[in-house]
Image (cartoon, coloured by chain):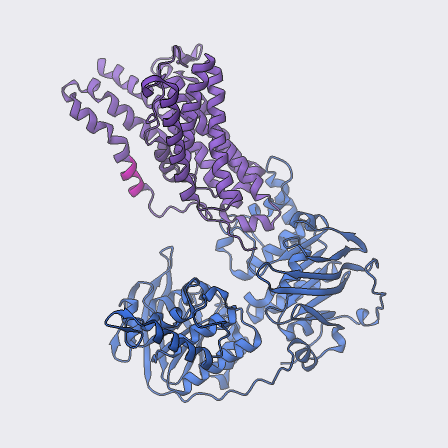
Chain colours: A purple, B blue
Amino acid sequence: MIEFLALTGLAAATLRVAAPLLLASLGETIAERGGMLNLGLQGAMLVGAFSGFMGAYFAGSLWIGLISAIIGGILTTLLFGILVINLDLDQVVSGLAINLLASGLTLYFTRVLFTGGVSPYLGELFGPMPIPFLCNMPVLGEVLFTQTGFVYLGLVSVPLIYVLLTKTSFGLRLRSIGEDPVIASYLGINVVKMRYAALLAEGILAGLAGGLLTISMFNTFDPRIVAARGFVAVSIVILGRWNPWGALAGSLLFGFTEALSLRIGIIFPELSGASINQLFALLPYLVALVALVVGGRGVRGPASLGKRIGRER
Amino acid sequence: MAITPLSSPFFEKREVNSTPQNEEYAIFLKNISKTFPNGTVANQDVTLGILRGEVHAILGENGAGKTTLMRIISGILKPDKGEIFIDGKPVKIRDPRDASRLGIGMVHQHFTLIPEFTVRENIALVLATSPWLDLKKVDEKIAAVSKDMGLEIDPESKIESLPVGKRQLVEILRLLCQDVRILILDEPTSVLTPIEVDSFFKMIMNLKSSGKTVVLITHKMKEALQISDRITVLRGGRVIRTIPTSDANEALLASLVVEGMLPAPTLVRGTPGDIILKVESLKVKDDRGRIAVDGLNLTVRSGEIVGIAGVAGNGQKELVEAITGLRKVESGAVKLLSQDITNKPTRFIIEKGISYIPEDRMHRGVVLTMGVHENLALKCIEKPPMSKSKIIDRRSMVKNAESLISKFSIKASDPCTSVENLSGGNIQKLIVARELSNGGLVLIAEQPTAGLDIKASEAVHQKLVELRSMGVGILLVSSDLDEIMKLSDRICVIFGGKIVGEFMPENLDVERLSRLMLGAD
């Protein structure tokens, strides 16, 4: 019975830790379908985490934290947009530059604003919001319906973004830009506008993904808080074959390994011990590597992904 | 070949006052000029009227400014000067959407279909106005237009699975679904076999009889004479003359298209010697892992030009890459003289005497940002005199460049200038110079004159013939059937990765050749 409870807990934890990956990879899916490989996702999450924390801490309201997390995410992806859309710079280099900038700035402000460079803890955080009635179901009630708002939002976004990409004119246009922006522009599609719209969506989702780390999960800010979640989210997009449902599956896979690595000591008490735990913390990244090698083979993404539009025309 | 003009007598008698405001003109261009940022003058003071309901051919060499002019009309480029009138009213065409609102649509030489999308999605892309994709409405439109035009296209099929000729029809279908009144077609027949051209021309006549105005960009005089009502000749970005097709003939047009054009010298046939290149039941896969060359057999003799005729995408690219060592051979053999060069490193193959003029000359033929002298020395850089004990001798590189520049009349400001400053024709001359100066046994020439003007093409052809008379065996892969027929001592037809037919020039049957190219025989 104890083992069963542990498994239910593991499933619930899987969803909880998958949420930031899911939100971020959904955002990246939208951007990449429009032909933009935004490695700056990591930076956008970090800025989201930082601004979310700052908003919540200084205004004393989690809701203001939520809004400022979204704004932080948007500003970061829009900066990426200026670099790759307006200036037509290399996408990979621009993304990496944004990551460096984000980690530099957040580190700087943390040091400047807080004594000892350590952020204080928030008094409250966005906790689980049990859904009435549904949360009383056996097993599913705890796994699915006693989660934070971020988890619900991520899960609801999957079908919505799927519909957006496949059933709307916006989605069709965006995908055509991802295949060939020059052809799309010949067909009278406003490539600049469409790409900024995609980055706006990514910014919101990445800001939420980062914000949830500070205002819902750890209730403090640390410049290393995002860990490599942004990069993991980018690989989830590839694994998920640029499809929101695939992003969900990938996020759950990584969420599961992460949750497992956190709980391995609870499920198998005989395995606990500091060095073993550290080793298990590597598990998600190892899975990322293996999954990309196995699942990422011969996968063809949007044809113009990562390419510069070029100056000629 | 006899040319039967399809034009109606109606246009011969039609007299129009040539003011831009005249509503009989579907399009009237007034004093259009366009200069590109790099200084190329593409159009200069072009004034031109296209009558409603006519088929109007814009004839000229590559680089005469035809495409630029049409891109201005379709809103992709903006003119520096000049006015555009549609149906007698002055208009501003800022982007392709403006053009399509005015009922103008263009089929580009490089198609603007998304290969990953289906026919339906490609058409929905331009029709979609509501936020929700209404695919049923798109299907209805496709069905209605297809029925009118007698086209049979499955909206479910993915573009990349369609042959080139069909893709072109999808382009036209898409324009018609947008209710375009004026269709601009840029070199539409360059991707078609002679049989397909015939049915394509029938469709143009259909379009005309349904009241559409068709502008046909071409560099082929025969085509212009066969299909159009009026012909405008462009040269060096200027309008040389607009004439009714009934008043035109090939000699007149030739004199208008090229200034001081000399009649092409008649080419002598080669005297083939022994077999030097032998390809035996070769199997090669394409990028997606499908068999692209499927048990192909081929020989090339010394002093012989073997032409490979075929519709693009039938294994030509993979064949060439397998011979030159750029692509893995799955099975079979490539032999140079008695030596097996199958799956040998490219370096080894080059040194054994295979030269290569690649189709993608900008990316595979030269290093664009490097100097002319460096590019000319690329294949012999590690040998004296270019380098001594592995240290490059810049002076001999420059000397080598100077001698090749004058021998091949390459236009370059100095021997060390970056290759990106050269025109397409001169880059091709540079590649030819490098490949020919290496003293190879076999030359693989892949689309050697694609995109070159008549004079540059002629120069390349002369060099190939010269090389043949020196005993080099040449494998000429080209989608330009005229080029194949002009140069080849033997023509092999490739279809589905196999050689499906072979002709000697003296018993060439063009009809049968094009059927073979389509795999219909």
The residue lying toward the viewer, choosing from B511 and B90, is: B90
Q: Which residues are magenta?
A: A288-294
In this rendering, does residue B152 appear at all?
no
Q: Residue at x 57, y 36 (%)?
A: A168
Q: Residue at x 59, y 67 (%)?
A: B189
Q: Residue at x 36, y 84 (%)?
A: B302
Q: In the rendered view, would you say B281 is above or below B89? A: below
x, y percent for residue B393: 31, 72
Q: Which residue in the rendered view is the most extreme toward the left?
A: A270
Count of number-bearing discs = 0
Q: In the rendered view, would you say B503 is above or below A70? A: below
Q: Quadrant of residue A172?
A: top right
Q: In the rendered view, would you say A195 is above or below B10? A: above
The residue lying toward the viewer, choosing from A37 and B203, is: A37
x, y percent for residue B460: 49, 78
Residue A293 is one of the magenta-drawn residues: yes
Query: Which SS does the magenta portion mostly show?
Result: helix
Q: Quadrant of residue B436?
A: bottom left
x, y percent for residue A187: 61, 49
The quarter of the picture where the C terminus of chain A appears is: bottom right
The residue lying toward the viewer, choosing from B492 and B367, is: B367
The quarter of the picture where the N terminus of chain A appears is: top left
